[in-house]
């Protein structure tokens, strides 16, 4: 099967792997059982990640596990408190802000985006805010445009949000609005523009004011064009498509790049502590009300790319062996991230790998990451289906 890599949802790679299990009491991993999670992280390194970090936060406190290295040249360990580009976990943050504006009566989920941004895209008078949030807008994903084939090239350029939307429009719509699920980073670029139009403030300002500060995410920020990851971080690597992963130097360091190509869709820089704090604050009712959270969890079936049972409004659902966990996955040149929590936000786990791979062999790496989630939340290994 030919896999089209996405910047956010790791769709085709996990098709059929995560199915909703009957809800049950999630297992609790004790200190003595952390070896279960460590085994999964070691498997991820064996499957092609230079290094991996996992952080757990729950009622018993927190713990951190790592495997591999943070830099292939120096052999330095993975920073235990390292920051990274969280990629499409950014969408959970943007969706939260949109729902806050809905609660304030400044936006409506089922009103066309053209009411605030006339002409922002073709069909703006028919594409609703809800459809942008749950990827049923029909907009193409601008990442599929030839402009974004080589991150070593586009990572050195500066893009305006309107340009990114323009690349999506050049590809043409994938469907009529509301017709079907089709993952689109362009939809979240439009949402970023919408937040700026409604609030009158830069998106980074609203992200900080409405989410980062209230959730205590002091290690996080939304860069515009700054290529540097501030604070401790592992070196990020990228494996281009068609390159033999076993060849010397196949993994290219790509830590520093201009993140303007990602912005509201997948541009946030954070760390595992902060992402766990975010989902705790969100699911604990500190960022949006109960009705908004229910709406965020209203899933849209994704038969074209059934990564998870549902993609809600900025949230993904992971069906583990002990029940459904909510969070998001992300992929950006240099890093891949998964962060999930139980329904109450009491138990959280974030996993970061310092690599983005585009070869088919990435699937075992992702399966191992799902296994690590299952080992923490459910206390048992996840059965990987036979190839």
Image: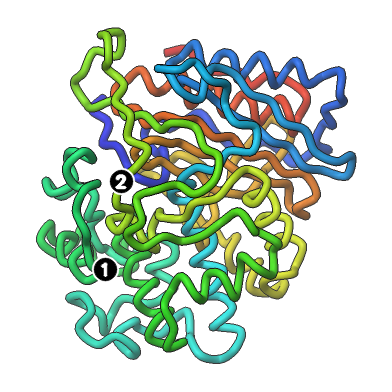
Residue at (59, 75) in percent of width and height: 209
- In this rendering, position of residue 35 left or right of residue 237: right
| Label 2 SS | loop
Tell me the number on the disc at residue 257.
Answer: 2
In this rendered view, identify the residue nearer to me: 76 or 104: 76
- In this rendering, position of residue 345 left or right of residue 5: right
> What is the total number of numbered labels drawn onto the structure image?
2
Q: Quadrant of residue 120?
A: bottom left
Q: Quadrant of residue 41?
A: top right
Tell me the number on the disc at residue 161.
Answer: 1
| Residue 168 in sight | yes
Mark 1 / mark 2, whichever is N-terminal: 1
Q: Quadrant of the C terminus?
A: top left
Instruction: Assess disc 2: are there few (<14), some (14-19) or many (≥20) residues with their C-alpha within 10 Å of its C-alpha.
Output: many
Q: Is residue 96 above or below residue 383?
A: below
- In this rendering, position of residue 336 left or right of residue 57: left
Coordinates of residue 361 in the picture (x, y in percent): 36, 17
Coordinates of residue 260 in the picture (x, y in percent): 30, 58
Distance (Cα) linking label 1 and label 2: 17 Å
**Color scheme of the displayed model:** rainbow
| Residue 184 in sight | no
Instruction: Assess disc 1: are there few (<14), some (14-19) or many (≥20) residues with their C-alpha within 10 Å of its C-alpha.
Output: some
Coordinates of residue 225 in the picture (x, y in percent): 32, 59
Coordinates of residue 371 in the picture (x, y in percent): 61, 24
Residue at (39, 72) in percent of width and height: 191
Q: Quadrant of the N terminus?
A: top left
């Amino acid at each position: 099967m030919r896999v089209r890599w996405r910047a956010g949802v790791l769709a085709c790679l996990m098709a059929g792997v995560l199915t909703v299990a009957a809800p049950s009491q999630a297992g609790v991993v004790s200190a003595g059982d952390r070896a279960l999670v460590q085994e999964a992280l070691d498997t991820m390194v064996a499957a092609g990640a230079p290094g991996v970090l996992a952080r757990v936060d729950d009622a018993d406190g927190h713990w951190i596990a790592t495997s591999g290295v943070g830099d292939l040249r120096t052999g330095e360990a993975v920073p235990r408190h390292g920051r990274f580009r969280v990629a499409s976990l950014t969408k959970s943050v943007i969706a939260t802000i949109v729902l806050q504006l809905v609660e304030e009566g400044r936006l409506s989920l089922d009103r066309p985006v053209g009411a605030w941004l006339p002409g922002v895209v073709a069909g703006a008078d028919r594409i609703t805010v809800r459809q942008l949030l749950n990827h049923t807008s029909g907009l193409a994903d601008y990442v599929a445009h030839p402009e974004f084939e080589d991150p070593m090239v586009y990572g050195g350029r500066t893009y305006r949000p309107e340009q990114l939307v323009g690349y999506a429009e050049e590809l043409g719509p994938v469907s009529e609005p509301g017709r079907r699920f089709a993952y689109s980073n362009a939809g979240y670029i439009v949402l970023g523009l919408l937040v700026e139009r409604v609030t009158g403030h830069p998106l980074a300002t609203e992200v900080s004011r409405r989410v980062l500060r209230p959730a205590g995410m002091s290690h996080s920020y939304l860069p515009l064009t700054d290529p540097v990851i501030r604070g401790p971080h592992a070196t990020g690597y990228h494996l281009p498509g068609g390159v033999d992963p076993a060849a010397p130097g196949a993994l290219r360091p790509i830590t520093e790049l201009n993140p303007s190509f990602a912005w509201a869709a997948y541009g946030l820089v954070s760390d595992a502590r902060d992402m766990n704090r975010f989902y705790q604050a969100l699911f604990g009712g500190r960022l949006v009300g109960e009705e908004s959270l229910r709406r965020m969890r209203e899933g849209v079936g994704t038969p074209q790319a059934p990564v998870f049972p549902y993609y809600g409004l900025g949230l993904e659902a992971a069906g583990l062996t002990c029940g459904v966990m909510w969070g998001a996955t992300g992929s950006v040149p240099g890093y891949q991230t998964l962060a999930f929590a139980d329904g109450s936000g009491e138990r959280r786990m974030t996993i970061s790998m310092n690599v983005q791979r585009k070869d088919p062999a990435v699937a075992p790496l992702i399966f191992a990451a799902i296994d690590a989630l299952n080992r923490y939340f459910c206390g048992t290994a996840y059965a990987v289906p036979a190839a």
